[in-house]
Amino acid sequence: MCDKIEFKRKLICKYFQAGCSNISFDRQAARNDDELPAKMYIFCDSSEEAYGCGMYLLQGRKSSLIFSKSKLAPIPL
């Protein structure tokens, strides 16, 4: 069973990487502009089962996701 799951995982990763070879992202999160200051917002939430947080940069009407992290607690077997 584990070999079959691992094979499917590798196959999905292979197709994902092949399809994502032409994707590009704007790395400039904010402009260096004194008239339009940037504001940083950080959101966090947690429970006994999971946690998550995200950091956004807002400048004028443009928002950029800077960082995010989430984690689930392991499922007991």
Image: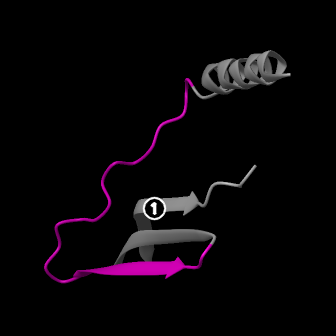
Quarter-of-image position of residue 48: bottom right
Tell which residue pokes out farthest to the front in this image: 77
- Say whether residue 55 is left or right of residue 4: left
Q: From the image, which quarter does the N terminus lie in?
A: top right
Which SS type dominates the magenta stretch?
loop
Label 1 sits on a secondary structure element that is strand
Residue 16 versus residue 53 in the image, above or below: above
In-front residue for pair 44/42: 44
Q: Is residue 47 visible?
A: yes
Other-residue count near label 1 (Cα within 10 Å), few / some / many at <14 / 14–19 / ≥20:
few
Q: Residue at x 60, y 29 (%)?
A: 20
Left or right of 54? Residue 18 is right
* 28 displayed left or right of 64: left
Q: Is residue 10 left or right of residue 29?
A: right
| Amino acid carrying mark 1 in the image | Ser
Residue 19, position in %: x, y? Answer: 66, 25
User: In front here: 52 or 29?
Assistant: 52
Q: Position of residue 34 (x, y in %)?
A: 13, 79
Magenta region: which residues? 21-48
Q: Position of residue 50 (x, y in %)?
A: 59, 69
* Image height of 17 relative to 77, above or below: above
Residue 60 appearing in the image: no
Could you tell me which residue is drawn at 64 percent across and 19 percent down?
18
Q: Is residue 62 above or below residue 67?
A: below
Q: Which residue is mark 1?
A: 68
- Is residue 46 within the magenta segment? yes
Residue 76 quadrant? bottom right
Q: Residue furthest left?
A: 34
Image spot of residue 15 (x, y percent): 71, 21
